Amino acid sequence: MPWQPGGTRPTAPNVVDILGRLSTRDHTILTLLQEHQVLTTEHLAALAPFPSHDRAQQRLRTLFQLHLLDRFRHRGLDGINTPWRYLLGAAGAELLAAAQGTEPPKKATLRRRQLRIAAHPALNHLLGVNGFFADLARHQPVVWLSERSATAACDALARPDALGMVGGLVFCLEYDTGTESLTTLVNKLDGYRELSASGGPEIPGHTAVDAQVLFLLPNTQRERNLRNRLTTPGCQVATTHSDLVQRHSPAGPIWLPASSTTRHDITQLD
């Protein structure tokens, strides 16, 4: 699928000149993209949040014109373009670096990073993880850490796809697309058992607590097959599958603990 950059726009303005035009929501968007790398209009409409998809489109277009964001899309084999995927732009990276007291990346470095995201074979997996949390945010206030930040919080004992916090629940998300063997999925629990024994992930600004492991599987058969292997998980585990997520939401009564036969809302898992 060819990568299509975001199109023409005016010359980049001086970042100082546009500071007064930015809202709290704009800063939220920049921070989200710094942490989570790539988000769609639909994601940002839920996370920022915006009152409507149209309002989100309009504002994101403006932020792109100001070089605060960059964007790309792919053309599928059917000739249809994907929705725009948004990335942190050069002006956005410069603004965040100034606010955080760090050096902004060089433009060539930022461009290589953007291309790596756009061309990465795991792009759809990353968009799926981010989409899960955007969908959850429509129903429950949620904070989540990217894979890199989550791995650091887990001291590399476990490497979840993301680490989420909703209500009183802290959870490690394993977003499965069916490309790994069930044995590989089960073996990941070794790291989570070590993490639990160490007191749980260390999240900046939060007291260390034990985290549940939530497996999102692509279909009901895959979930059933995994659960048949979860005889003694040794840590708190719950599972669901994509059909239930689409029918309800990540917040809904779709989560089945390893030791239960009844599905629960996500906030009932804590």
Image: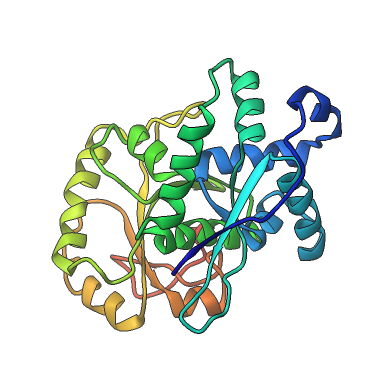
Residue 165: image location, x then y, percent: 51, 45
Depth order, front residue of 233/7? 7
Q: Is residue 169 visible?
A: no
Residue drawn at x 44%, y 41% as measured from the top left: 112
The image quadrant that residue 155 belongs to is top left
| The quarter of the displayed image where residue 184 is located | bottom left
Residue 92 left/right relative to 164:
right
User: Does the image show residue 156?
Assistant: yes
Position in image of residue 171 (x %, y %)? 41, 49
Residue 249, percent across and down?
56, 70
Q: Is residue 66 left or right of residue 158?
A: right
The type of colouring in the image is rainbow
Q: Residue at x 65, y 63 (%)?
A: 42
In the rendered image, the vertical position of residue 234 relative to residue 185, given as above or below? above
Nearer to us in this view, 47 or 249? 47
Quarter of the image where the N terminus is located: bottom left
Q: Does residue 82 lie above or below 25 as drawn?
A: below
Q: Is residue 189 above or below residue 196?
A: below
Image point (35%, 60%), residue name? 121
The single residue placed furthest to the top in the displayed view is 101
Given residues 268 and 29, the one toward you in this image is 29
Left or right relative to 224: residue 117: right
Report the residue at 18% width, 68% height from top.
Answer: 182
Q: Quadrant of residue 215?
A: bottom left
Q: Is residue 217 left or right of residue 41?
A: left
Q: Is residue 14 above or below residue 173?
A: above
Q: Residue furthest right?
A: 20
The x, y position of residue 161, in whole percent, is 37, 51
